[in-house]
Image: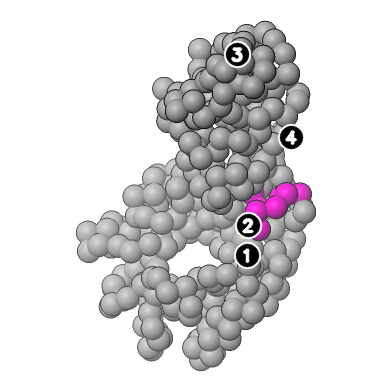
Amino acid sequence: MHRSEITIDLGALRRNARRLREVLGQSELWAVVKANGYGHGALDVAGTVLDEGAAVLCVATVAEALELREAFADARILVMGPTTGREVAWARDARIELAILDGEVPEGVRVHLKLDTGMGRWGLAELTAAPVEVVGLMTHLATADCDEAFVKQQLERFEQATQRHAHLTRHAANSAAALRIPESRLDAARCGVALYGLSPFGVDPGDDGLEPVLRWESRVAQVKRLRPGESTGYGRRFVAERESWIAIVPVGYADGFRRDMTGTEVIVEGARRRVVGSVSMDAIAVELPGPLSVGAAVTLIGEGVLAEEHARVAETINYEIVCGIDSSPVRARRTVIDA
């Protein structure tokens, strides 16, 4: 029996893609499917968003791109991360497009010159003449989820640097900018987190018309009564002040339920319950109002509990929560539906 079950709803993914295309208007939707589709399954996600009109698949590495190329012979695929000489050759052979972050433009490969307008990471300090291999110009917005004024400074720099190259595709917006900063949409927007029904603003995704795509569930494996003064878990972080009942659920930080998510809430038999004590590698403890049957359903992420809530407890972002879930068959059962 699997310790937990991960369900990916491609129907929700389709609706999110349609929502983004509606928002983008005449701008193209470029789907970011790096990191195994943010933990949702890159191949399933890619096939679905291509069906929904995504014009380009965006990844971080050539290895990710090559996996997609095997499944999608005609799709446009853009690698946004750095590449080595050997990887450039592989990309050339597989008709994969590359982001040029510094240095020379390789021959025989369609490329996008990336300008650093304020992210302070990958990117060119300035644009030079664009060789024939250049098909796009791009930048990366640093604060689209929290500081619109700085985004507008970046866009102004980008506009000034690229106005001589109006014939090339220009793209800057991420999910946050695509949803709420219309002037950032340009010719295309590279959307990742919003496709998966996760809020780029750390709020309820429904606020922007999005639906979570991933559901993560487990079950109660053991129920224990704690007398006053008894504890559960490493370090005795939870000590019962009165007679208490706890459920032991067979997921832990090895499965992606992070150690710093102690204190978050999950759904047990339809009611929200608090995770107490230390999160172990393979188990968590959940406080109960009374005894409960072994096998009771536990929703870790899904209806009634959002990845954004866990992220707030862990003082991180929802991206990290979903990317960290281990969906390998030795730890979880993965199911794909299209509802």
Q: Gap between marks 4 and 3, in whole Å?
A: 28 Å
Which range is magenta? 198-206
Q: Is residue 98 visible?
A: yes
Which residue is the extreme one toward the left?
86
Which residue lies at the image location 61% right of the left edge and 12% below the top edge? 227
Coloring basis for residues:
one colour
Q: Is residue 186 visible?
A: no
Residue 260 as seen in the image, left or right of residue 89: right
Residue denoted by label 3 = 226
Classify mark 1: helix, strand or loop: loop
Residue 73 as seen in the image, left or right of residue 63: right
Residue denoted by label 2 = 200
Residue 38 placement (x, y as % from top left): 51, 46
Residue 201 part of the magenta-drawn span = yes
Which residue lies at the image location 67% right of the left edge and 14% below the top edge? 243
- Earlier sequence position, callout 1 versus callout 4: 1
